Image (tube, rainbow, N blue to C red):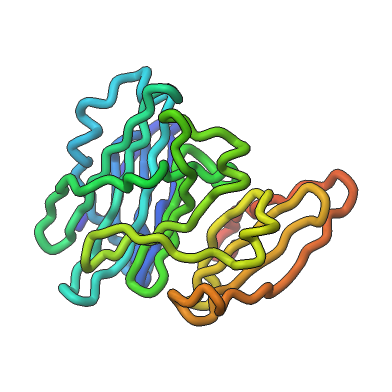
Amino acid sequence: YGRYYPRAGSFQFGILGSCNGLILISVDKGNLFLWNPTTRQAKKIASPESYGFTDAWDFRCGYFIYGFGYDDSTDDYKIVCVFVLGPMKQRRTTTEIYSWRTNTWKKIENFEKGVLVRCNFELGMFTKGKFVNGKLHWLTSPYKEDVYDDDEYLNNWEIVGFDLAEEKYEIVGRPQYLSSHNHCQPRLLELGGHLSLTCFNEESGMDVWVMTKYGETESWVKFWTCPRVGSVDILVPFPVPSGMRV
């Protein structure tokens, strides 16, 4: 562990995930840290191998998807990094997973039934997986001639879960109501330990759904509806520290 990470000048900073009081942060491209805010200590994580061959064009045209969680079967913290690189018609995916116990990265099988998508509501260049029930969750959109487009995403998106113990992907059923009323802008959340979902519709506003029993599609419940007011968009709050308060 190191106590501080000195840095001069401007830099990119992002929170990529949290679990059991530990926070995964990114400082500039390739600098990953696990930070314990209670002890104010941080450990630098070696960069994934795929960082080494990412050229400037691929980097500008693609994005990274991260996830951080705990594997209770091996008492291990794991980081998943998905590189979605290249321009649309040449887009390709590489997936790597980091183990705290071995302090190493390894490449694993990619998700082949679509492309994990970057959420427009997320700040910065990173999309963060939601850790629920031992699995990381992201949104996915089907390939269409090696390209995903907005219409395909808004109509045919799915939820994909990554089991940290098995290190395998699986589809998690979305609310059945959205199968026939599905043209929306979805975003995944974790609320009170439950997998949750917001769906924003240009006409009706935003619905919040909660999966009350994990893995049971029928257990999705519409928890709350926020009606659209005029042309006001739904905004993500950005916390600003003030002394010891936020």
Residue under the image location 53 percent in, 50 percent down:
157
| 21 with respect to 95 (left or right) | right
Residue under the image location 29 percent in, 41 percent down:
31
Q: Nearer the viewer, residue 115 or 10?
A: 115
Is the C terminus in the top left, top right, bottom left or bottom right quadrant? bottom right
Q: Nearer the viewer, residue 226 or 13?
A: 226
Rendering coords of residue 138 (x, y %): 44, 54
Residue under the image location 45 percent in, 25 percent down:
88
Q: Is residue 230 above or below residue 12?
A: below
Name, please, the residue furthest toward the left: 102
Residue under the image location 65 percent in, 52 percent down:
236
| 5 with respect to 144 (left or right) | left
Name, please, the residue furthest toward the bottom: 213
Q: Nearer the viewer, residue 74 or 14?
A: 74
| 142 with respect to 231 (left or right) | left
Q: Note whether residue 36 is visible.
A: no
Q: Quadrant of residue 2?
A: bottom left
| 35 with respect to 149 (left or right) | left
Q: Quadrant of residue 77?
A: bottom left
Rendering coords of residue 223 (x, y %): 68, 75
Q: Is residue 130 above or below residue 57?
A: below
Name, please, the residue furthest toward the top: 57
